[in-house]
Image: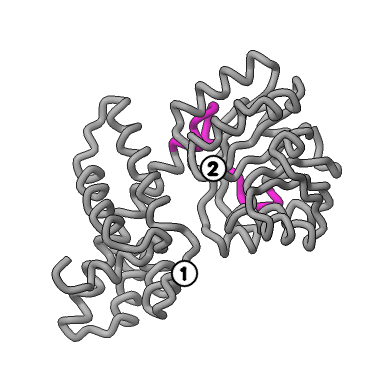
Amino acid sequence: MSDAARTIGFIGLGKMGSPMARLLINGGHRVLGFDLAEDALSHLTEAGGTAVHSAGDAAAADLVVLMLPDSDVVTSVLHDDAVVAALAPGSVVIDMSSSEPMRTRELAADLARRGIHLVDAPVSGGVRGAEAGKLTIMVGGDADVVAGITPVLELLGRPVHAGDVGAGHAVKALNNLMSATHLWVTSEVMIAGQRFGLDPEVMLSVFNGSSGRSGSTENKWPNFILPGGFDSGFGLRLMLKDMKIATGLARAVGVEPTLGDEAVELWARAAGELDATADHTEVARWIASAGH
């Protein structure tokens, strides 16, 4: 494979998938896009892509990108009869969803029996990162296959080859468990400091020049929480799903995720009370609310 123009099937044109597909189009590739939402297909067409009306039609390409909610949906798509028929030996499926690493390995073995390569390549960076082409892309798969698709991934951000298939999904889930945990404690600290009388901007300045800094102090609090937008583009329930994947993975390899389990329990409480569409940064508002 090379970085020459090619036809790419793209299944899942949501908040993340839509700008990612647009970047591939702008990079000179022909994109066959499918999504259940008609407005997503319209946006793809406006960007210069080709809207198709089934996952099978999108899978009729030598490179197929999946940007879907979870492993259940990924499995359903890849087991769809039309998709099975469309995927040709030698083709590559890139699962950029936040999927379960053990199930990713099972799907990879299943596809490999038909001569199809599966690469997992979940992302971090949110909607803004997707729009700017500055995502961190955590890639798992055969080194030669990964090398062949790297020019395509580089249109979307910075790919990092994490290891064999499943490694990308594993490190993404573990990253999000860390992200969620430090967002929670950062929110408790920021709220406590403000109630004491500290200026939140001053606190962030101190933390970001000290050992307490994190993605929460450098990005989430100044950009999405302090301004009151709570609009990072990544849902609270998606974060909770990734956290559970991470603690499940830890347990599967013999590590007891003591703090991770506590974090999952706290986030689950917030998810149970906040709106189903709540952004993950809204946990800060929930923590600040009386009587939580």
Q: Which residues are magenta?
A: 154-170
**Kind of residue sitting beneath label 2:** Ser
- Residue bearing mark 2: 97
Q: Are marks 2 and 1 in contact (CB under 8 Å)?
A: no
Answer with left or right where residue 239 lies relative to residue 85: left
Secondary structure of the residue carrying numbered label 2: loop
User: What residue is rendered at 27% in x and 61% in y?
Assistant: 273
Q: Answer with the quarter of the image where residue 11 lies.
A: top right
Question: Does dot 1 land on a helix, a strand or a loop?
Answer: loop
Determine if the magenta segment contains residue 270: no
Identified by mark 1, the residue type is Asp
Residue picked out by circle 1: 231
Q: Residue 225's x, y, as percent? A: 38, 73
Report if residue 286 is visible in the image: yes
Residue occupying the point 73% across, 44% down: 152
Q: Position of residue 21 (x, y in %)?
A: 70, 52
In the displayed structure image, the side of residue 204 where residue 6 appears, left or right: right
Q: Residue at x 77, y 45 (%)?
A: 52
